[in-house]
Amino acid sequence: MKLWKTILTAAGLVVATGASAFAVRTDLVIGITLEPPHLDPTAGAAAAIDEVLYANVFEGLTRIGPNGEVLPDLAESWTISDDGKVYTFKLHIGVKFHDGTDFNADDVKFSLDRARADNSVNAQKGLFAAIDTVEVVDPATVKITLKNPQSSFLYNMGWGDAVIVAPETADTNKEKPVGTGPFRFQSWAKGSSITLIKSDTYWGAPVSLDKAEFRIVPDAAAAIPALLSGDVQAFPFFPDPDSVAQVKDDPRFKVVIGATEGETILSINNKKPPFDRLQVRQAISFALDRKAIIDGASAGLGVPIGSHMSPANKAYVDLTGLYPHNVERARELLKEAGLENGFKATLKLPPPPYARLGGEIIASQLRDVGIDLQIVPVEWAQWLDQVFTKKDYDLTIVSHTEPNDIDIYSRKDYYFNYDNPTFDKIIADLNLTSDEAKRMTLLGEAQKILADDAVVGFLYELPKAGVWDAKLEGFWENAPIQANDLTKVKWTE
């Protein structure tokens, strides 16, 4: 029981005082580095879209939890046929979109058919390739039949690209997103912030926050001052690992270093000469000093990788020893490729500090073996247009934060321009295999092929450095997907 005391003032007024008179905060300002190009997770590849909207505004049939597990979401349960091809989902009833319209099985069919249509602009269209038909059984039941069994199907339905949208608002979600989540969109001050507010009609457990503003802080050097001033209370993905030491021992903040699914790579255009020659790509791999790159671009926090798999994944194979830093071997390979005098190329760098800082280091390392790189800084929208979409690049640096995405190397229109039928067959077999031991074997073989072919320069797994006010709890420690899930975030006093 709290003890209260009455204080008789000179004016004869009685005032009650006590700790419980202070209400717990329900507003939050979260710092993000990149502004989303738009606000529709089903129509863009930028991680910044999901970092604002996933689980907050939009929901899917399933969702990915903080440890990478598959959880029910708009589907409260499901059954799977004996042949593994038919999934019958029972949907929550009484769910409404933020515009007041009802959610039902028709919306699921619309969303999945839209995502896999010939004219789909979904950045992860491959997630839906195994779907044969989507049938509405009744308003609360939907049956999805696959062309073949797919062991990752429930996981795939938990991606941000697979969230459910309404036909009435699908075309306007880029500017005014309408979902079924615990927060609804309030405003977007472009170049400044995106604000979400609590949905009073949410079907699930209510969230603690009434308002969440995602403040865009593109300058990594401004992150610490923003925290110290109180203008921003949390950076779940802190943009400047070197600055973490400034607040690590400050009791006002929590500093949490976790893992991500972000394979940070030196991407190579495999069909563009001279990168279409194996010796050139291998020379690049030998020229890379991962330790120096990790120290300079991630404050030593990154974990080196030798293929496209997170070290936190149970299928991970350590292939970092395949290409040890060896300048002489790199020069020999360039000579074998007829390039003993070296060559010039461009390195397009998007805005994140890991890319800009890492690019300077890598350019210096490749210069040592005779590869003269012209660094071309680009904004995120330019990178998506020039590099990711049009494949107009030589080299670039990016962290692929999508989970379990080794299959991207089998996509014929993907920006690596990589083509290996043996690798494609392994991925096809993987999609048809549910036996865990066989899957581990196939994933190991896939990693080895990518490393042998030196498809890209594998650098390190992007660390998740989170810094937030010590009175906050509920943020994810790790990042199994690219999200800032606020459903459990709250102030403790």
Image (spheres, grey):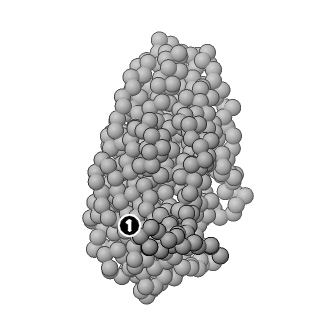
Outermost residue to the top:
341
- What's the residue at 47%, 52% (across, down)? 233
- Residue 108 in picture, x, y percent from top left: 41, 75
Residue 69 vs 309, above or below: the answer is below
- What's the residue at 40%, 77% (across, down)? 200
Q: Give the residue number, with chain letter if any, for mark 1.
A: 197
| Residue 414, visible in the rendered structure | no
Classify the position of the N terminus by image quarter: bottom right
- Residue 46 in picture, x, y percent from top left: 40, 50
Q: Along the horizontal axis of the image, is 440 left or right of 124? A: right
- Residue 245 in picture, x, y percent from top left: 59, 36
- What's the residue at 63%, 24% (across, down)? 325
Residue type at numbered disc 1: Ile
Given residues 327 and 54, the one toward you in this image is 54
Given residues 306 and 482, the one toward you in this image is 482
| Residue 175, visible in the rendered structure | yes
Residue 283 vs 45, above or below: the answer is above
Look at the numbered disc 1 and give the secondary structure of its residue: strand
Counting the numbered discs, the total is 1
- Residue 98 in picture, x, y percent from top left: 35, 74
Residue 193 vs 201, above or below: the answer is above
Q: Quadrant of residue 293?
A: top right
Classify the position of the C terminus by image quarter: bottom right
- What's the residue at 44%, 25% (across, down)? 274
Q: Along the horizontal axis of the image, is 363 left or right of 465? A: left
Given residues 128 and 264, the one toward you in this image is 264
Outermost residue to the bottom:
138
Residue 5 vs 224, above or below: the answer is below
Given residues 458 and 219, the one toward you in this image is 219
Q: Tell me the crowding category of disc 1: few under 14, some 14 to 19, or many 20 or more residues within 10 angstroms, Cα based.
A: some
